[in-house]
Amino acid sequence: MKIRILSIVALLLVGIMTSFAQNKTEEFKVYGNCGMCEKTIEKAAKAVDGVKKADWDKETKMIKVTFNTDKTNLTAIHQAIADVGYDTKEVRAKDEVYNILHSCCKYDRAEE
């Protein structure tokens, strides 16, 4: 009987702790062109600790990310994507990183 009560209490605690984790979903523009860009952009976003999901659409150039706000923020996600060569509305990739992208991945960059 004690084990059953302890199991129920443990499950309730896990449920309460999970509900306190703040997951947020945001969408923003990331410049790119092709399927190779998609893989690189999504991989960079998912590498940020706290990012649960990342899905970039090459037609709309929009990425939808779900992340835990206790572990990361949008600025860190923008920066991770820029670090692999892709401009976002918030962070511009360094020229030297953009320049080593594969030729099919080189999108038209907006002026600074």
Image (cartoon, rainbow, N blue to C red):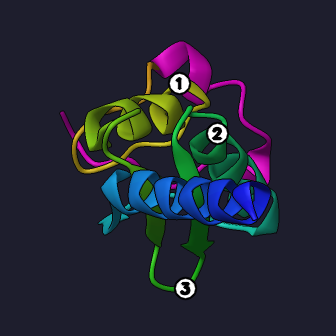
- Residue type at tag 1: Asp
Of labels 1 and 3, earlier in sequence is 3
For marks 1 and 3, give the one nearer the viewer. Answer: 1
Left or right of 102, for residue 73: left
Q: Magenta span covers which residues? A: 95-112
- Extreme residue in the bottom direction: 59
Kindly indicate the quadrant of the structure image that contains residue 54: bottom right
**Is residue 15 in view from this perspective?**
yes
Q: Element at badge 3?
A: loop
- Residue 17 part of the magenta segment: no
> Which residue has dot 3 on it?
59
The location of residue 111, given as percent across then percent down, is: 22, 40
Residue 78 coordinates in the image, percent (x, y): 37, 39
Is 47 placed left or right of 31 in the picture?
A: right
Q: Which residue is mark 1?
A: 83
Which residue is tagged 2? 44
Query: Residue 36's x, y, as percent?
Result: 81, 58
Identify which residue is drawn at 74% across, 65% down.
4
Query: What amino acid type should be assigned to the residue bearing mark 2?
Result: Ala
**Discs 3, 2 touching: Cβ within 8 Å:** no
Residue type at mark 3: give it: Glu
How many angstroms separate mark 3 from mark 2 (CA)? Answer: 19 Å
Mark 1 or mark 2: which is in front?
2
Asked if residue 16 is positioned above or below residue 91 in the image, the reply reads below
Image quarter of the C terminus: top left
